[in-house]
Image (spheres, rainbow, N blue to C red):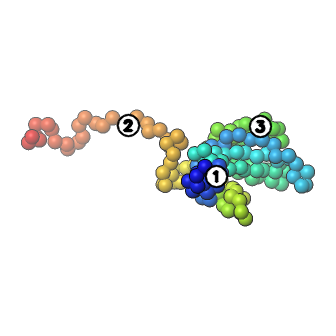
Amino acid sequence: MGLDEHWDGGGQYLGVGDHFVTVESYKATGKSKQNNDGIEFTCVSNGRKARVVFWLTEAALWRLADFAKACGLTKEEARGYDAFNFSSHRALVNRRVMIRIVKNGKYHEVDDDNGWWAITATNWSNGVPSDIAPKNRDPEPLPTTAPGAPDDKDIPF
């Protein structure tokens, strides 16, 4: 194995910066020190991954709701999303979102303060991966004659 495989840092994990990712899977984290359940989502981009963890407490559910909204979950869909029901988390799998990875000590992790946001046209300015770029609609047909346009017989060639 050469160093080139680690040239961009992080090995199998996403490096520091902003990334377009797909929520690939989720799993239970086990209990926290305070005996709370948690859920961990694995987000992937170009073969690298990041983990996003949420503790399932009433006081912290706003973070999961914020992440779900950034993933494109609608308010109507959120009504049926029970964070304490493990299978409900499937609603976020295969959704696209932008995440921000920061260095925390010696590890890279999703920024707790400003870690995710919805993919919008304004954050596509640096280029969007083709698999999430909006597909162009069929263009409107051009008018065959525009007001004041020259007729073919008026063109000298």
Kindly tell me whether residue 118 is visible in this rendering: no
Q: Earlier in the sequence, mark 3 or mark 1?
A: 1
Q: Which residue position holds label 2?
A: 139
Residue neighbourhood size for the residue with mark 3, other residues' Cα within 10 Å, grouped as few (<14), some (14–19), many (≥20) = few
Q: Residue at x 10, y 37 (%)?
A: 153
Q: Which residue position holds label 3?
A: 88
Q: Earlier in the sequence, mark 2 or mark 3?
A: 3
Q: Residue at x 44, y 39 (%)?
A: 136
Is 83 left, or right, of 139 in this rendering? right
Q: Residue at x 51, y 52 (%)?
A: 124
Q: Residue at x 78, y 35 (%)?
A: 87
Is 50 left, or right, of 8 in this rendering? right
Q: Earlier in the sequence, mark 2 or mark 1?
A: 1
Q: Which residue position holds label 1?
A: 11
Q: Position of residue 66 (x, y in %)?
A: 70, 51
Give the CA separation, mark 2 to mark 1.
43 Å
Tag 3, which secondary structure?
A: helix
Tag 2, which secondary structure?
A: loop
Nearest to the eye among marks 2 and 1: give it. 1
Q: Position of residue 120 (x, y in %)?
A: 55, 49
Query: Along the line of sight, which residue is nearer the eye, 12 or 81?
Result: 12
Q: Position of residue 61 (x, y in %)?
A: 79, 50
> Where's the C terminus, which quadrant?
top left
Three-letter amino acid code of the residue under disc 2: Pro
Nearest to the eye among marks 3 and 1: give it. 1
Tag 1, which secondary structure?
A: loop
Which label is found at residue 77?
none
Three-letter amino acid code of the residue under disc 1: Gly
Give the CA separation, mark 3 to mark 1.
31 Å
Is 92 left, or right, of 29 in this rendering? left
Residue neighbourhood size for the residue with mark 2, other residues' Cα within 10 Å, grouped as few (<14), some (14–19), many (≥20) = few
